[in-house]
Amino acid sequence: MALPPLDSPQWHHSFRAFLWGARSITATVLTLVLFATYLGIGALAHDSGFSLLWTLVSTAFVWAGPAQIIVITTLGSGATILQSAIAVTVSAIRLFPMVVSVLPMMRTEQTKRRHLILVAHLTAVTLWVECFRFLPQVPRERRIAFIHGLGCGLVCVCLIANTIGYALAANLSQLLGAGILMLTPLAFLFSTARNCRELADVIALVLGLLLFPVASLLNSGVDILVSGVVAGTIAYGVHRARAGA
Amino acid sequence: MSSFIGDWHALLVLLVAGVLPNQIWRMLGLWFGGGIDEGSELLVWVRAVATAILAGVIAQIVVQPPSALASVPDWLRYGAVVAGFAVFLLSRKSIFAGVIAGEIVLLSGKYWLG
């Protein structure tokens, strides 16, 4: 699927842009990966004793795969609400810099903060990656509508996947369960690697992978934050050193 | 129908344990990110930290795997990631080819081990 050229009348209406965004879910393999991941989350929720409505509400309002896996496995295994909330919030810290780096791509002079609330909510790794790929092909004043369409399309796919996974859960073998859980790290790794534009991004990815096992020795509860800030700052330092040289 | 809804208490727990601790970071991003310029140096650092935190999430799932994935031996999980990454590079950065290759290694290895 190719998007219309930037000067096409197709972009004159926000609603058209929304539909182009929604149709773009067919132009990325990450949609398939999300589908399989949310199939797995549906099955996991079923096996952990949560209702289907609960599962769908978590997808619509949490909208972050790792956080949903964490909340289901921790609550399902008897952790307290506080323990579960802390684990979720640590995994969600990555959303902060993602939102900060995505929003400037679609802001115009007229954009108010409230226009960006839904975009912020829809921001997760898939949308973050696809913003860098799709948005240069979308006129700036239609980008918010386009992302609303893309994000809502992805949420719908995942709600359907949840329902199917929930229904299939009883028949899911341990082999298939392991395969589905492995999709998240593989897809995250390759989509982030493809998204690397500058040397700083590559260094951040490689160091982030290598430093996590070291940081996890601290057992601080915020290991991901520690390794992430250290690796990201070193990568930025290299970027600065090269720019200055 | 009641089995579809479950109990309301569980939904309240979801709000407190799942929705709010996750959503707060997005709303903080919206609050602080409003004024940052697209080409600014701060954004380079922020993006590097986002990438590195994501790398940490990836490493955590592989190194400290949840439920069914924990039944796969360490070497097989690492092998699947390495094989997938090699195919990803060889296929001129096809996410699909990389994911499929990693999954084939993981599933056939696990099937073979029994």
Image (cartoon, rainbow, N blue to C red):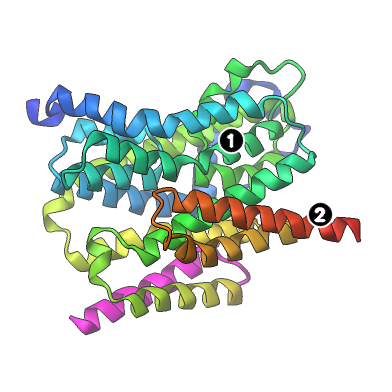
Judge whether residue B1 can be spotted in this image: no
Q: Which mark is residue A240?
A: 2
- Residue A206 visible (yes or no): yes
Which residue lies at the image location 70% right of the left edge and 35% below the top edge? A105
What residue sits 73% from the left and 30% below the top?
A: B36
Say if the magenta span includes residue B95: yes
Residue type marked 1: Val
Q: Magenta-highlighted stretch: main secondary structure?
A: helix
In the figure, A199 relative to A21: above or below?
below
Q: Which residue is mark 1?
A: A99
The subunit carrying tag 1 is: A
**Magenta stretch bounds:** B92-114
* Rendered residue at 44%/30% (across/down): B23
Residue A70 position, x and y percent, is 31, 46
Q: Give the image location of residue A124, x and y in percent.
A: 50, 41
Q: Residue at x 30, y 65 (%)?
A: A179
Q: Amino acid at mark 2?
A: Arg
Numbered label attached to residue A181: none
Q: Which quadrant is the C terminus of chain A positioned in? A: bottom right
Which type of secondary structure does the marked residue at label 1 adopt? helix
Q: Would you say A100 lies left or right of A243 here?
A: left
- Residue A184 image position (x, y, % from top left): 40, 57
In the displayed image of the protein, which residue is found farthest to the bottom? B112
* Mark 2 chain: A
Is A126 placed left or right of B89 in the picture? left
Number of other residues with Cα within 10 Å of mark 1, as a class: few under 14, some 14 to 19, many 20 or more: many
Which residue, as the protein is rendered here, is positioned at the far left?
B2
Question: For the residues marked 1 and 2, what is the alpha-carbon distance in whole angstroms?
Answer: 23 Å
Q: Is residue A220 magenta?
A: no
Q: Residues within 10 Å of mark 2 (few under 14, many from 20)?
A: some
Along the horizontal axis of the image, is A238 left or right of B100? right
